[in-house]
Structure formats: C-alpha cells, structure tokens
Image (cartoon, rainbow, N blue to C red):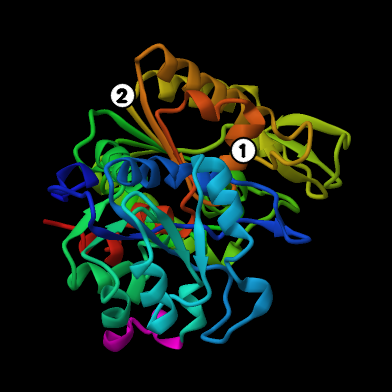
Amino acid sequence: MSFKTIGDIQEPAGKRALVRVDLNVPMKDGKITDDTRIRAVAPTIRELSDKGAKVILLAHFGRPKGEVVADMSLAPVAPAVAAVIGRPVAFCADCIGEAAAGAVAAMQDGDVLLLENTRFHKDEEKNGADFAAALAANGDLYVNDAFSAAHRAHASTEGLARLLPAYAGRSMQAELEALGAALGAPKRPVLAVVGGAKVSSKIDLLENLVTRVDMLVIGGGMANTFLAAKGVNVGKSLCEHDLAPTALKIMAAAEKAGCEIVLPVDAVVAREFKAGAANETVALDAIPADAMMLDVGAASIETVKAKIDGASTLVWNGPLGAFEIEPFDKATVAAARHAASRTKDGKLLSVAGGGDTVAALNHAGAAGDFSYVSTAGGAFLEWLEGKELPGVTALQA
C-alpha cells in the first residue's frame, strides 16, 4: 500500500489542515475517564502545529444520528486535548457554515481548533457530497489520523479525502505500517491467535486468516465449537453446536491452504462461572457433562508457547479463556507474557487488537512489550477479515 504522510506535506506553514481524529473518549459526569485516544493523535497535532499549519480537528462523539444532542457535544473534550498537547485548543459550535468559517478565519499559524461533532449532521454518515464539500471549504489539505473510523465511508473519513490533498497522520501511519508488517508482507512463519466467545461473530475473520497464516490457534468459547464439531463432548460449555458444519468447513479450508489449526488438548472446567470457583484440569475426553470449559490447561498452554516460539510474526485477537475471572485467566496471561518476552528479545513481531484483546493484554501486563497494539476495534477486525477500509483506500496514492 502506498500513501502519503504528513511528512510529505510541502510548506505546511499557513495551510489549513483538516485533521480527522478519534476523540470518542469515555466520559462520566462531564469528565473524560480515559484519554488514550487523545494521546494517540497528539503527535500529529503537535507536528502540524509546530510546522505552522492551522490545525482544524474533525471528530465524532457518540451516535447522535444527525441531531444536535447536548451531551454528545465535543466542547468538554477541547480542554482535555489542550492539556495533552500542551497548547490552547479553541472550540467552534459547528463544523460547517458561517460559524466554522469565522473560527477558521480567526486562526493564526500553529493554532489548533476543534470543530463540533460531525455526526450532528445527517449527511456525515451518509457521506453526502454537499456536506463533504462544506467541510472541505475550510481546508487546504486533509489528514486522516483516525484508523478506528476508517472502516466507515463517511464524509469526514472518505469524502474529504477525495476533495483535498490527503495524508495519513502519524497514528494512522503507525497502524498501517504495523498491519502491513503483520499480514501484508510478513516474515514467516505467521501465527494467529484468535479467541473470544462465539464463532458466529468471527466467521469472516477465520476464513480469511486460514488463507494468510501458517498456524492458527483457536481459543476461548470458539474452541468449544470446533472441538464439538470433531466429536468432543464439551458438557455445558459455551458452544454453538449449530455451527459445527461451519467449523468443519473452516478446518477443511485450512488443511487445503496448508494452515495448521491448533485446538486445546486439555481443559480447565468448573460447574459455576464465578471468581475462585472450584475447578479441575481434565483431558478432552473427560469433560464432565455438568461442567463447562472456562480455560485451557497446562498442556495446551505449553503447545501455544511452542507455536509462538516457532513463529516470526504473531497476530493476536481475543483471549484464550474467561480471562476476566480468576483463575480462568492463566492461559491468556501465560501466552501473552511469552509472546511479549519473545518480542522484547527481538525474535517476534507481534500485532494485537480488536474486542477484549487490549484489556486481556493489559491484564497480563504484556501490552507494552508487543510490537503494536491497536485500539481500533471494529476497523482492526475488518482489516483482519480482509475487507476494504474506505478511509484507508481513499488515502492511497
């Protein structure tokens, strides 16, 4: 994939840079509880500001569905952005029209301005041509630094990139480079670890991965469906028995593609789903009819570690067990820490993201040592599924 970055902008001083960022941060009682997304886009904002560009931030907040909703205003976010980037951030109560034009006209080189929630306008999510043109009227160039919204063909994520010279921000650049290294042109062997509750939510993901990776570890509740399809009695474990044909189809596709599917070889079972529940490790053919599999056992953990040792590239999505509840977090923690150690030693390129993955890696204390951890959620999953991301496609040079 070829795309321009903000480093390619010629003479940015004085230019109006419309920068799409993700400021959809969690908020409680009017206060931001996690500024991770703000910190992610801060380098792009600072770099453009330092080079003298007029930095005009476009973002959404919540799902107002084209209506002005007071508690979905970005006004309270402006001071938080200012605190993170270390410079003032002005705010305008609309993202188009006279108010926005006036606010932009008042900017000096290096100033930062946050415009109101783009989703207060119905044509944002419809990618309306007139709305995109109204946004473009206030800019000389466009920067997309919101990979998390790149799977949506909205006016501020796709339409604008067709109207103005378009560039990737530093966060977007890091994401695309990490994803390219993981599956675009990876160093082999490539291992994918996919966990989570249900196969039904990850069919596209699994079908794509078996054609792209050399080894695929399946964990979590998903593994139960595959085991049941192979004739294992999984007791009262979470299992989509009706998807047995789908599981068999995926395993057949993997065999045809030369992808090794790795399933649990033992199980940690309990009769109730709660912290500290009485549990035991059993062989797959000894899962009690009244028990449920909540994690994989020591033998399975060693198998996963061995696969990590044999890989040069790792893509991780989802936990191996019910990691939220001790002691059913052991497999996820052990495998994550092992992958982090291999990465730290320079023996593995590791990219992770989507769903509960970030929480699981943070729980294991391993996220900081992975090569790249994406917080993009849906966009990361759609990329893993092999789908085109409109906001990324629009940036391609």
At label 2, the amino acid type is Ser
Give the residue at mark 2: 312
Instruction: Give x and y (percent) for residue 284.
Output: 64, 37
- Name the residue nearer the viewer: 236 or 155: 155
Give the residue at mark 1: 360
Answer with the quarter of the image where residue 205 lies. bottom left
Quadrant position of the C terminus in the picture: bottom left
Q: Pointers 2 and 1 in contact (CB under 8 A)? A: no
Q: Residue furthest top?
A: 345
Using a 10 Å C-alpha cutoff, classify the residue at mark 1 as few (fewer than 14 neighbours), some (14 to 19) or many (20 or more): many
Instruction: Give x and y (percent) for residue 261.
Output: 40, 40
**In front: mark 2 or mark 1?**
1
Q: Say whether residue 39 is visible.
A: yes
As displayed, is residue 203 above or below residue 366?
below
Seen in the image, is 345 located left or right of residue 293? left
Kindly identify which numbered label has been placed on residue 204. Answer: none
- Name the residue nearer the viewer: 229 or 6: 6
At label 1, the amino acid type is Ala
Stretch of the chain drawn in magenta: 122-131
Q: Say whether residue 219 is visible.
A: no
Main SS of the magenta part reads: helix
